[in-house]
Amino acid sequence: EVQLLDSGGGLGQPGGSLRLSCAASGFTFSSYAMSWVRQAPEKGLEWVSGISGSGGTTYYADSVKGRFTISRDNSKNTLYLRMNSLRAEDTAVYYCGKGGLARPNSSWLDYWGQGTLVTVSS
Amino acid sequence: QSVLTQPPSASGTPGQRVTISCSGSSSNIGGNTVNWYQQLPGTAPKLLIYSNNERPSGVPDRFSGSKSGTSASLAITGLQSEDEADYYCAAWDDSLNAVVFGGGTKLTVL
């Protein structure tokens, strides 16, 4: 059974940093792309970043480019999102998603984590 | 303003057929496959349709997807109360080098 467990959310200061994690199990982690998708309170879904199965290819939404870094440790079956220079508008529930393919340039996410809430406020 | 355009709301009575549209452009829907997600209140999104018209195992055949040119549609037949949820379309955008979502459609079962 595929399971994705998001963690690391909490209160972050404007200009500060947080690191999110997504622990994966139930599939060959290195064979699939992974993504982060966020949802601000009472808003729709917004894709944040994607990474290939090998970790060699990454993509970012313009809204986070230069501030967020996606990475993965295939030996630990874990996906990460390093969030720097946090802004109030980064406040959202962050979901990790398992890609249906090895390549990250696809909107096919067949499994999702439960989400972790990030609140950016002083 | 979302790159993919969906109606903000849709509604139907039990047993009815409802369709939700998703309009894009040549850089997203026109050149890439469309996926649909269902988000029940208070839960994480769930894949409903992938590759334009494929259903993951466990998704009832009441749900179907189609794509034509730069638009896509989700159809739900035999509407049930448990179908009340938010529905999102998504596609890769070759110009933005990003996944783009529609703004979401809130489906109400009357």
Image (cartoon, coloured by chain):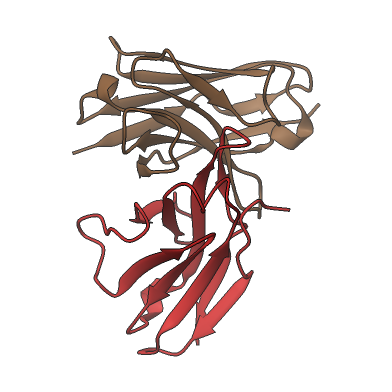
**Does residue B40 sit above or below A121 in this rendering?**
below
How far across and how far down the image is residue B43, in percent? 45, 53
Q: Determine which quarter of the picture holds residue B96.
A: top right
Residue A14 lies left or right of residue A52; in this view the side is right
Residue B24 image point, x, y percent: 59, 57
| Depicted B81 relative to depicted A76: above or below | below
Q: Residue at image x 70%, y 33%? A: A90
Q: Could you tell me which residue is drawn at 60 percent across and 54 percent down? A: B25
Q: A114 or B46, which lies in front?
A: B46
Q: Nearer the viewer, residue B106 or A30?
A: A30
Residue B99 drawn above or below residue A50: below
Q: At 40% from the left edge and 38% from the top edge, which residue is drawn?
A: A113
**Chain shown in red:** B
**Number of on-image labels:** 0
Residue A15 image position (x, y, % from top left)? 78, 17
Q: In the rendered view, tell whether residue B110 sits above or below residue B84.
A: below
Seen in the image, is A79 located left or right of residue A49?
A: left
Residue B23: % across, % down: 59, 62
Chain A: give its colour.
Answer: brown
- The residue positioned 37% from the left and 82% from the top of the image is B79
Q: Choose top left, top right, bottom left or bottom right for residue A42.
A: bottom right
